[in-house]
Amino acid sequence: MRLKVLIADDEPLARDGLKLMIGTDPRVEAIFEARNGREAIAAIREHHPHLVLLDIQMPGLDGFAVVEAFGADKMPSTIFVTAHDQYAIRAFEVSAVDYLLKPVAHERFTKAFERVVDRLRVAAAEETTLQMRTMLDAIAHPPRRLTRLAIRAGEKTMFLPVDTIDRIEASQNYVRVLAGQTSHLVHVSMNAIEASLDPDTFIRIHRSHIVNVKRITHMWSMAHGQYVVELVSGERLQSGRTYGDRIRTLLTNPF
């Protein structure tokens, strides 16, 4: 695993000393520097380092303020570096991997660095295992596709088979479902109903329109990757620019 390391210290000599200790380690991919807490926060956001060597006493925002800006659970692995040992207890309260006193001895630094590498290796293995379990669960339990809609009308509930739907359009906090000569309002978002429908049968052609591909009779290409879709009802809908790739899959035969 190649590591990105951020050294945050207001003393140039302290930063140079830490760079010498880790600069020749082949596991280190890149080293970034910050001279104060504000620069440290910006560098973490920009570079996403695996490890932060963080001085506690810095002008403006100190090391603890940097941790508080992200939250201890969202901080990269952190080793506090300081000339004062009275901060040791608080350092571990905010989940620091280790705590080094200045001047930092090379042997002590090596032990702390190896602890970080071991911790990151375990975390990577756990993340890989979780991803594998998630994938296997998705294969074993594929999402259930919507086969009918329950539509309330006063005290009555009607059931509409989804294969009878021609198209669906956004209507503020609802969607309007059009099937033949009828239309129905359903209190659900476009994203939610799109995720519930079979993607082989329904395609979203616009942020406000989902159509049943079995109801499409003709299509015309336009400029900027847009299309006009004609349904069996004769109704024509224009696609959005960002949906061109989805629609182009309909333009070829599956052989």
Image: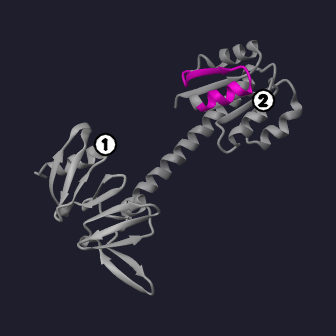
Q: Position of residue 193 (x, y in %)?
A: 39, 63
Q: Who is closer to the viewer here, 151 or 3? A: 151
**Magenta-tinted stretch:** 26-45
Residue beneath disc 2: 61
**Residue at left 72%, top 25%?**
109
Indicate yes or no whether the magenta region holds residue 9.
no
Q: Who is closer to the viewer here, 2 or 56? A: 56
Q: In the rendered image, which quarter is residue 54 located in?
A: top right
- Judged left or right of residue 3, residue 190 is left
* Separation of residues labelled 2 and 1 (CA atoms): 46 Å
Secondary structure category for the residue under label 2: loop
Q: In the rendered image, which quarter is residue 183 located in?
A: bottom left
| Residue 5 in view, yes or no | yes
**Residue at left 22%, top 38%?**
223
Q: Who is closer to the viewer here, 191 or 68? A: 191
User: For the residue marked with disc 2, what is the amino acid?
Assistant: Leu
User: For the residue marked with disc 1, what is the amino acid?
Assistant: Arg
Q: Where is residue 222 in the image (x, y as percent from the top left)?
A: 20, 41
Indicate yes or no whether the magenta region holds residue 39.
yes
**Residue at left 39%, top 65%?**
175
- Judged left or right of residue 108, residue 84 is right
**Where 136 falls versus 56 (above or below)?**
below
Q: Who is closer to the viewer here, 237 or 130? A: 237
Q: Position of residue 209 (x, y in %)?
A: 32, 57
| Residue 145 in view, yes or no | no
Picture disc at residue 223: none
Residue beneath disc 1: 241
**Where 144 falls versus 123 (above or below)?**
below
Outermost residue toward the right in this view? 86
